[in-house]
Amino acid sequence: MHSSVLARAGDPAADHDAVDDRALDRLFRTARTHNGWADRPVPEELLRQAVDLAKMGPISANTSPMRVVFVRSKQGKERLKPTLMPQNVEKTMAAPVTAIIGHDLSFYEKLPRLFPHADARAWFAGNDALIADTAFRNGALQGAYLLLALRSLGLDVGPMSGFAPAQVDAAFFAGTPIKANFLVNIGYGDPAKLFPRSPRLDFAEIAQFA
Amino acid sequence: MHSSVLARAGDPAADHDAVDDRALDRLFRTARTHNGWADRPVPEELLRQAVDLAKMGPISANTSPMRVVFVRSKQGKERLKPTLMPQNVEKTMAAPVTAIIGHDLSFYEKLPRLFPHADARAWFAGNDALIADTAFRNGALQGAYLLLALRSLGLDVGPMSGFAPAQVDAAFFAGTPIKANFLVNIGYGDPAKLFPRSPRLDFAEIAQFA
């Protein structure tokens, strides 16, 4: 392990609360979106740990709308297969696990328990646009926390938007108010099947100060 | 620092690629949404590092729609103030930095550079629903990566949805195709102003296997 990028003497950014370079590499810098998978099973315990980490991430009014189906059986994968865009079929069928990240449009029914300080249920009930917007935003935030939690536990991920959401909803969430948002292949990545890393925007194209 | 939760002998989940308990605490477990702020400035270098970490996180087709304004001047804070819901005014005016996390609805114009393997611009141009959906989803994912990147650098965050998006757009993104998604107060949190931690859902309420 190399020394922390933030631990240089005299660096105003030095902070003993910062995580080390190895963690930053594992989470952000050297981690890659994987397309091929080693023949190595994913312990169920890691999926459970990842969900229990992700659910602690910050969200609006503890709304907690994310719902997840970890598809790992042959039957489950066959149900998923016809919903996928052609370029996503092979890698998804080969992945040890494919998670469907969805959000529950009835999330506000749980707010009397999750956010007991106020009548938060009343902010949402009957306001379908606010419900959809809040579920999508906070479900995506929680999905991102889950991706980084999986990485933090040593797993590799390959998230995808290339599928038919209505077909996934019909196959996995029929009769429920849960809507699919994105899919994530999960396993131990095969570095031989990585694509070259794509360029990113410069800081000044992303951010400004005011 | 305590030993890694994953390094127990005989634990099938043990993995040398996992990050340590200290990082998991810092990112997820003991980190809290902060409402009060220590009188300690936020080095600009940390904000730059956080953006450069967050932009490496996985997104759909490298679409990279997130745009950020770090509001830290008195004039900037005064422009933001009238857009805030009353309960968010005091803590936001007191925070060393408030980031506006937005997404650029013209993100696809940069895809010939960001995703050169295919004509990805053509997937989006003219499809306003797909553009809005993709920008919202991937902008939120990138916003979540930024929150965890800020935490990984030792900073505390307090994200908020309680503001008038159209007013923020008018005040900070007028004449651009950028839309505000959520706000984040950034600084070194004052533990005395934390609320008690709210309960989370059980694993079985969030996730299932198929």
Image (cartoon, coloured by chain):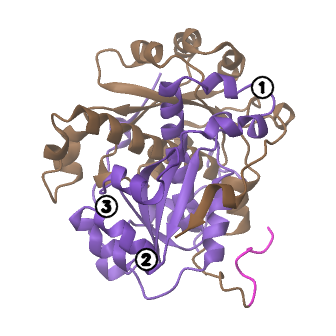
Chain colours: A brown, B purple
Which stretch appears magenta? A1-9
Q: Which residue is mark 1?
A: B118
Give the answer, above or below, for where A116 lies relative to A10: above
Q: Nearer the viewer, residue B45 or B203?
A: B45
Q: Which residue is mark 3?
A: B83
Q: Position of residue B67 (x, y in %)?
A: 56, 53
Give the distance between the C-alpha atoms of the residues marked 2 and 1, in whole angstroms.
Answer: 43 Å
Q: Which residue is mark 2?
A: B75
The residue at the point 73 percent across, 63 percent down is A22
Q: Position of residue B105 (x, y in %)?
A: 54, 39
Check residue B153 in the rendering and tell me which mark sits there, or answer none.
Answer: none
Asked if the residue under mark 3 is in contact with the one under mark 2, i.e. CB atoms within 8 Å, the reply is no
Which mark sits nearer the N-terminus, 2 or 1? 2
Chain bearing mark 3 = B
Residue A5: say if magenta. yes
Give the distance between the C-alpha atoms of the residues marked 3 and 1, in whole angstroms.
Answer: 40 Å
Give the distance between the C-alpha atoms of the residues marked 2 and 3, in whole angstroms.
Answer: 14 Å
Residue B184 placement, left or right of A130: right
Give the answer, above or below, for where B166 lies relative to A101: below
Mark 3, other Cα within 10 Å: few <14 / some 14–19 / many ≥20: many
Chain bearing mark 2 = B
